[in-house]
Image: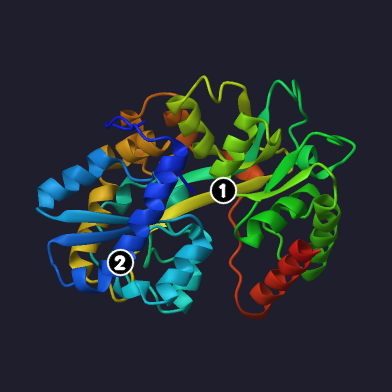
Amino acid sequence: MPTVSSQPRTLNAAQRIRLAVVTSALALASAPVAAQTAEKLYLFNWTEYADPGVIAAFEEEYDVEVVESYFTSNAEMYSKLVAGGDAQFDVVVPTDYYVPRLVAADLIQPLDEVTGRDNLMPAFRHPSYDPEDRYSVPYLWGVTGIVYDSQTFADPPPSWSLLLDPEVNGDQPFALLGGDPQVLFGIACAYQGAGFDCTQRDQWIAAAQLLQTTLDRSNFTGFVDSTAAIDQIARGVARVAVTYSGDLDYRKADAPETYANLEFFIPEEGSQLGVDTLVVPKRAPHPELAQAFVNFMLRPENAARSAEYAFYRTPNEAALPLLDEPLRSASRLDDAQRQRLAATPELEGDQLQMLQQLANEVRSR
């Protein structure tokens, strides 16, 4: 769920994506051999989600080299760990609801030497996805919402209806978020009044029916990821889509003229609160160094720099005084936000299979 930095950026978005793909491929190809080298730490992360300055500080303090590889979805991350990546990477950054799946698949190990949890806000301690704080540490958090062209929609309703109701948007092109179907079905459920965290079969069937009619509309342009959605609106390919808060904030800061007309809101029906976490794979080549990295990222100064770089919010309360406004205010999870935001529910077994089957049927028609 990622991406201002202490180091200037000179690559455009397409170049960064190509570089990420090449880097990831090279790292995966060399990992089994390189994993024998103790002076390296292998980090598997979302693109543009770690401040190079913070990484450099860790390398200097521990006299190591951090080798970064990248994924673009939780599903991709999970597949690579299942395929042997749990022995290739030292630290991975899954989103909250994937932590139980990684535990159930025996792909991550307990974090027994973590220090700095006291720096976290109470709202991010003992979360439902890891109630004993045993396997993960919150890294950054953000919200899922709607990004739109303000010149096309001068005063849109703060609702998922901008995407899902043809009477509200009957002709302007729109895109939906690809990747994990839980987010897609959560959006439809929220719009229908069942809440983003819906888990019942009848709720999913109703959501699937709504999504099928939505995909049949002539102004539906397709499924895209969060960053591609933003760029499509900037280019005029779409006028409204789904994105993550930090992705738009970063792009507006990085290229304000390009994204000047893009705005974002959290729909009134509710949406996703996503927490990206730090975990250590079960067969990590350097588990002690990995836990040292987790502790390093929990230091307030490093948590603050990470948030400012990625334009996502920090769960680290001790880091708040180090942040500039409005990120400091945005990082505080208040009661009003909690009422509108929900964590993605944990699914497994037959329930997860049912949702995947419904999603496949929706997307195949």
Residue for badge 2: 89
Q: Which image quadrant for residue 323?
A: top left
Residue at 39% across, 57% down: 93
Answer with left or right where residue 40 lies relative to residue 225.
left
Given this view, does label 2 or label 1 mark the residue nearer the observer?
A: 2
Give the residue at x 65% y 46%. Answer: 271
Where is the C terminus found, in terms of image quarters? bottom right
Q: Which residue is mark 1?
A: 273
Query: Badge 2, how many Cα within 10 Å: few under 14, some, many 20+?
Result: many
Q: Is residue 339 visible?
A: yes
Count up the numbered dots.
2
Label 1 neighbour load within 10 Å: few <14, some 14-19, many 20+: many
Q: Position of residue 57 (x, y in %)?
A: 17, 43
Location of residue 188 with respect to 153 vertically, above or below? below
Residue 137 in the image, given as x and y percentages of width and height: 36, 57
Residue 115 vs residue 9: left or right? left
